[in-house]
Amino acid sequence: MNTTGIQTGPGTESGLLDQFGRRATDLRISLTDKCNLRCTYCMPAEGLDWLAKDAQLSAAEIRRLVRIGVDTLGVRELRLTGGEPLVRADLVNIIAGLRADHPDLPISMTTNGVGLAKKAAALKAAGLSRLNVSMDTLHEETFKQLTRRPFLDQVLAGIDAAAAAGLTPLKINAVLMRDINDHDGVDLLTWALERGYELRFIEQMPLDADHGWTRKDMVTAAEIREHLSTKYVLSVDPRARDGAPAERFEVRSPSSEAVLGIVGIIASVTEPFCSDCRRTRITAEGKVMSCLFSREEVDLRTLLRSTDDDGAIAQRWQEAMWAKPKAHGMGHTGLGDADFVQPDRSMSAIGG
C-alpha cells in the first residue's frame, strides 16, 4: 500500500494496467456534468446540483491530463463526454488544443445533438474526428416523454450538420425503454441504414439519479435482436470486437445477401464484457473511475492544482486503474446480485 490507500501495481511504464491483465487505452473524459435535457433514464425532471465552475477541470487541466495519458500511460483514443459537452463555452478551444498536442489521436465526442447544427463545422475545423449522437426515437411526442424537452428537430438538424461537416463515421446511440419507445427500434434502424449511420442500442443501465431502474423494466439485448429480426436478418460482424463495448451485427434484408449496414448492441447488464474492458474515465471534477459502475473514485484534480510533477499524477492514475474490480457485479440478474450496489452518481455526473 502507498499513502493513497490504494494497492499499487507496476510502474507507469506499464500503462493503465489492472490486476486482471486488462490495459486501459480508451480515455473517456467528461467536460461538464450539466445537460440541457432531462432524460428519464439519467436524471430527475428538476435536474441536479451542478458543479461550480471552479470545481470543474479547466481547459489547461484537461489538456494536461490527456498529455499524461497519451505520452506516459498508453492512451490511444479519446472520447469527450458530459453531461452535455456542447454546453461548455470553451469546447471548440479545448478540442483545438488537444489536436495541437496530439495530431494523430482519434478524438470523438458523445452529444445529445441539441445545438450541434450551429457548431458542427467549427468542431470539425478544430480537430474533432467523429461524433456519437444520442437519439432514442424519431417521434416528437415520444422524444418529449423521454427527455422532457421538445428538441427532436434540433437533434435531427445537428445530425445532418455533423454528417455534412465530415464528423464520420457517425454513430447514433439509442436506449429503448419498455412501453415507451421499445417498438421504435426497427424504425430507427431503417432511418440509420438509409443515411449510412451506425445505430447502437444501449441497454438501460442502473445509473439514473432517481434510482428507479429495475431489471424487469429494462429492454434486454435479446429482446432488441428479436425486435430487429422482424424486418432484418442480423449476423455477427466477422471483424474482431477488439475491446469495443458494442457487439456489432451485419444487417441484411431477408431477400438479399447484400449487407445494408451495421448495428451495434451494448449489453452492459445482460451480456457484460468486463473481461475485455479497456476504458478509463475521468469525471468533470477530475476523479478517476476505473469502471462506469465504480463506487470508488480517485482524485486527480488536487494533484493537478498542487504539483508540477506529471509523474506523480500518472502514478496516482495508474494506481486507481490497478484497483479496478474484475467485473461490475450485476451478473445477469441486475440489482438482484448481492454484491452489486448502484452508484450514487447518475450517468450525467460520470461521463459515458
Image (tube, grey):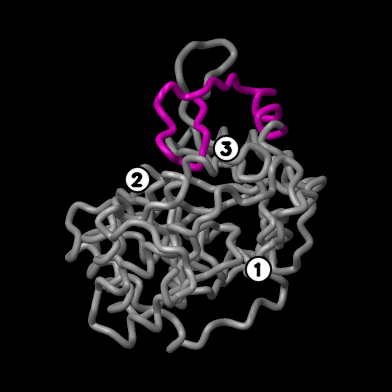
Which mark identifies residue 168?
2
Q: Is residue 313 above or below residue 257?
A: below
Q: Is residue 143 above or below residue 43?
A: above
Say if mark 1 contacts mark 2, CB within 8 Å.
Answer: no
Side of 162 where 225 appears, left or right: right
The kind of residue on which mark 1 rests is: Arg
The kind of residue on which mark 3 rests is: Ile
Q: Earlier in the sequence, mark 1 or mark 3?
A: 1
Side of 310 where 155 appears, left or right: right
Mark 1 → mark 2, Cα distance in angstroms? 27 Å
Mark 1 → mark 3, Cα distance in angstroms? 23 Å
The reply to whether the magenta stretch includes residue 228 is yes
Viewer-nearest residue: 25 or 36: 25
The reply to whether the magenta stretch includes residue 133 is no
Viewer-nearest residue: 346 or 23: 23
Residue at point 31%, 77% (across, down): 61
Q: Position of residue 190 (x, y in %)?
A: 57, 33
Q: Which residues are magenta?
A: 223-250
Q: Earlier in the sequence, mark 3 or mark 2?
A: 2
**Dot 1: within a 10 Å radius of its alpha carbon, few (fewer than 14), some, or many (20 or more) residues?**
many
Q: Position of residue 312 (x, y in %)?
A: 29, 74
Q: Position of residue 145 (x, y in %)?
A: 73, 60
Viewer-nearest residue: 94 or 212: 212
